[in-house]
Image (cartoon, rainbow, N blue to C red):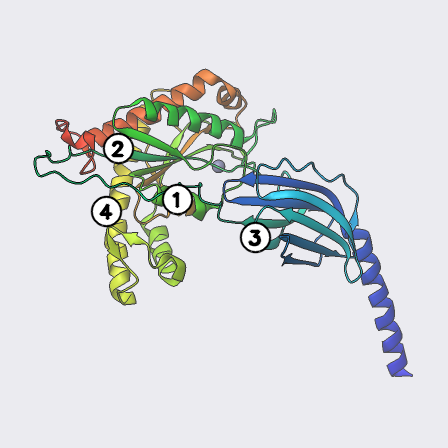
Amino acid sequence: MYARIIALGYGIFCALVADGAIAQATVQGVRVWDAPGASRVVFDLAAPVTFNVFTLSQPERVVIDIEQGQLRAELPKVTNTGVITGLRSGTSAEYGLRFVLDLAQSVAPKGFLLPPNDTYGHRLVVDLEYTPPPEVKSTAPAVVAPIEKSEPPAKSVKRDIVIAVDAGHGGEDPGAHGRKGTREKDVVLAIAKKLAQRINQETGMRAVLTRDGDYFLSLRRRSRIAREAKADLFVSVHADAFRNPRASGSSVWVLSQRGATDEAARWLADRENQADLVGGVSLDDKDDVLASVLLDLSLTGIIDASTRVAQHVLNNISAVGAVHKPAVQYAGFVVLKSPDVPSILVETAFISNKGEEARLRDQRFQQQIAEAIMTGITRYFKANPPPGTWWATLPLVVGER
Ligand SMILES: [Zn+2]
C-alpha cells in the first residue's frame, strides 16, 4: 500500500514535470549572426530546454533537436553570407522539434544555454566554427628569378606599427544601453572604425579591426586576432553604464598584475595556447615552472608598456570631455589578458548618462574621441617605437616615455 502511494505520487510528479516541459519548451524566436569564420544561431526560449546538437555529412548539416519543443516563430531568411545555406524545421520522433542547418562546409558545432540578460530571455546558442577555404591560388609553379651577383641588396623594408582596434560587444551581446535605446555595441563600432581610419592615414601605421560588423566575438578570439596580426598594441573601445545615471566621463583601463597572474596560470593550463610565443620564447618545450617565470617577466613588461600608453591616451581624452577616473585604472578584464601585446581598454563615456548618450551618438564626438585616442597612441609610439618599424628610424622624443 505504502509502495503504491509512492508510485502514484511519483506518477503525478512526472506528469507535472512533463506538462511543464511542454508548456515551456517554446521557441519564440530564431536569429542568425555571421562573423568571419563563425556563425551563430540563437533560439529564444520561454525556459531552459533539453537539447541535442549533432552533425550529418554528405551533404554537410547540423541538426538541433529540442525536447518536446514547439516553434512559435518565423524562421529567419538565410542571407548566404556565412557558412549556413539553409535553415529548416520539422519534427523528430525522439525529441519533438528539430532544426536542420544546411552548410557550405563542415563545421564544429557547440551548443549551450544562456540565462536571461537585460536584452534577451533564455536562449539556446549554437556556434558553428569553421576554417574558410583558402583563396584559390594559381597552380602554376612560382617562377623564381635567378639572383645576379651584381644585384644590389634588397632595400630593407621597415614594417608598420600594427594596432588592433577592438569594438566591444557585438551581435548577441549588445553591451550597455542608454535610456533612449542607444546600444553600446553600435556606438563603439562607429568610434573604432573612425580610430582605424585615423591610424591608416598615419605613415608607418596600420589598423586591424577585431570586428567590422554586428556579430559576436569571444574575448579570447579578440586577443587571438590581435596576436595573429602581430599587433604592437590592442585598444578595446567601450561605453560604460552605471546604476547612478549621473556618472559621467571617460576612463582608461589596464590589466591588473593580479588578474594577469591568474591568467598566466590559466594560459599554462590551456594546452592550445602553450605553443604561442611570448616575447619570442616558445613555451611548449619548457617545463611549467620555467614557463611560468618567463610568462610573468613578459607580463610585467607588458603591463608597464600598457600603463604608459594608457596614460598618454588618458591625458588626451581629458581634453575632449570630463574624465571619470583621473588616473589609469587597473582590473582583470579578460579582453586585456594577452601576455604578449600591450593592451588598453577605453571607456569612452557613460551611455547610462543622458547627456553622454546623446554625445555618443554624435559623429563629431565619436571623431573627437577617436582623435584623442590616436594622439595618445602616437605620443607613446614616438617615445617607444618598436624595433624594425619606420617609426624607429625617426628621432626619439626626449622627455616622454
Ligand atoms: Zn563594454
The residue identified by callout 3 is 106
Relative depth, front residue between 127 and 255: 127
**Residue at position x 39%, y 19% in the image:** 368
Vertical arrangement, residue 109 with respect to residue 286, above or below = above
Q: Does the residue labelled 3 lie within 8 Å of ligand 1?
A: no
Question: Which element type, helix, strand or loop, lies under badge 1?
Answer: loop
Q: Is mark 1 within 8 Å of ligand 1?
A: no
The amino acid pointed to by label 1 is Thr
Residue 325 in sight:
no
The amino acid pointed to by label 2 is Asp
Distance between mark 2 and mark 4 Cα atoms: 22 Å
Question: For the C terminus, which image quadrant?
Answer: top left
Question: Which element type, helix, strand or loop, lies under badge 2?
Answer: loop
The residue identified by callout 2 is 160
Q: Residue furthest top?
A: 364
Residue 356 drawn at (x, y percent): 49, 23
